Image (spheres, helix red, strand yellow):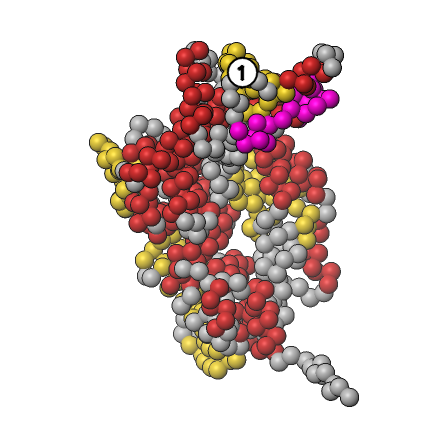
Amino acid sequence: MSEAGPRIAVLDPVVANQIAAGEVVERPASIVKELVENSLDAGASRIEVTVNEGGKRLVRVRDDGHGMGPEDAILCLQRHATSKIRTSEDLHQIQSLGFRGEALPSIASVARLRLLTRPVGAVSGVEVIVEGGVVTEFNTIGCPVGTDIEVTDLFFNVPARLKFLKTSATEMEHIMGHLTAFALLHHDVSFRLLHQDRQVFSAPASGTSIGAAATVLGGDLAREMVPLAVDAGTLRIGGHVGKPAIARSTRSHQYFFVNGRPVRNRTLTHALYEGYHTLLMTGRHPVAVVAIEVEPSAVDVNVHPAKSEVRFTREWEVHNLLRRAVREALEQAQLLTSDEHLSRQEGSASLASSISEPASDGIQGQLFSETAPEPVEGEHRLPARLRPLGQIANSYIVCDSDEGMLVIDQHALHERVLYEQFAAADAERGAARQLLAVPLPLRLSPREAQAASSNLGAMAALGFDLEPFGGDTFLVRAVPAILAHRDHERVLRDVIDDLVATAGTRSFAHHRDYVLRTMACKAAIKAGDALAAEEIDELLRLMRECRVPFHCNHGRPTMFTIPRDALDRRFGRT
């Protein structure tokens, strides 16, 4: 007879809190986020965050908010103890950042925590010390009005979770991301971040959203941003969006807020890009700070344990309003007047991206629908004989071959040719550097400066010699030799953007390859460039020397063949 299985038992409160902590406390940045949200809910005007070893050893958040009395100081460490809600109906009217009463007990269950707090009007404050979820001390103490929470030795009692933490630089990047978002929206609050006793981020209260953008993202970006302002009664949209000229290589400069809460939401992201329709080059992403205010009952903020995702009851209404707000903001900045005007004014880079789409959706599908043209790469070989016939729209090279008619995207093919040439030269000589006759001052946002400071060695290996020049400014003294006479500042900013977006987790080889691909794209023949017969012949010669001539560096096809029998069928010859 088999033995009975284990009996069901109610979990110990400490174990239950540790399980909850697995959802709420993923890394040190999670602690910073939860504690700063509590400070904002408490009406703080100054918030200071101190961390050591990327927050793995210490996270301390001090504020000048309302503070708490002795009873609340104990209650706030108990799970589901909250001043924000009383009934289930209150969940549909949430306006505060925190409300579930889970953050502090969850944090305290996996770390050592010290809480100092004093409310306005009280003569003294209280000190509560918690270790692994157990209160070990409760004292009356002198302290300023507000709250000071110190969290040390994260995951000391659950060491298995320590191995999932990344380097201090990576953890710092996540912390910087949260503080950047808070400072952008709460421009009436001063924020300060210290790491290893060194100030790495400071955002004094500016009182305006554009002032906050200038402080956090940098004055150069802020000057190229235009305001959003739409009021539809129960739905309001504010913030700023960047002109297409300052679009970045990653989405790291996009911030969305709903009722004061930093969020992720695919509908908002999609609406933002729809507002920029036809304005952005392929691979570029808009800079945006979007603040949405909506009736609390029209949004669900309880979707995710970390409250970072939201769901709207009227999703497409929000989508359409944001898309329109972005479009109108760009129109008012005289960046466009109509879609027709846009289509006429698109640059060659935009044209190059559009013509590189699979041809079956375009004219190829319309003219030869009976038989879809076969891409050259299907057989992984080039036609043995090619006779160039000329160009179409100064963008496509048309050639006669034994197999039929070969159509080549001149920009995509030349980009591939140059990329392979650059990569071969780089592999042979290494990252050759070119000293700049006059060092280039490079002003960065605090978040970008932190990423650059943490990766100076990697940047030098790429060929960029950066020297800290005070504050968030660096001097660029050398650049990769292949960038010497080209737009090296933009490439450098794109690399730093990528460091921010990936928290420094991508390899040196990835960034090196990015520099090479960017240079190839910038230097290649453009769509719209008229080519002489000799230039076409030379490009076809170089094509035959390519290792991978069938795709450009972005993965798009460089050529396709319309077979002879497809032409015959089209004209009724078979």
Residue at numbered disc 1: 399
**Position above or below: 249 against 102:** above
- Residue 87: x and y in percent read 72, 65
Give above or below for 412 relative to 159: above
Q: Quadrant of the C terminus?
A: top right
- 185 vs 217, nearest the viewer: 217
Q: Residue at x 44, y 36 (%)?
A: 222
Residue numbers of the magenta segment: 361-381
- Is 512 above or below relative to 87? above
The image position of residue 57, as x and y in percent, is 40, 68
Residue at 59% in and 71% down? 19
Towards the viewer: 343 or 350: 350
Residue 121 appears in the figure: no
Q: Position of residue 536 (x, y in %)?
A: 45, 16
Q: In this view, which residue lies farthest toward the left?
A: 437
Residue 441, picture quadrant: top left
Per the image, is 364 magenta?
yes
- Viewport quadrant of the N terminus: bottom right
Answer few, some or many: residues within 10 Å of disc 1's Cα (few below 14, many 20 plus, some between 14 and 19).
some
Q: Is residue 477 left or right of residue 454?
A: left
At numbered mark 1, what does the secondary structure look like: helix, strand or loop?
strand
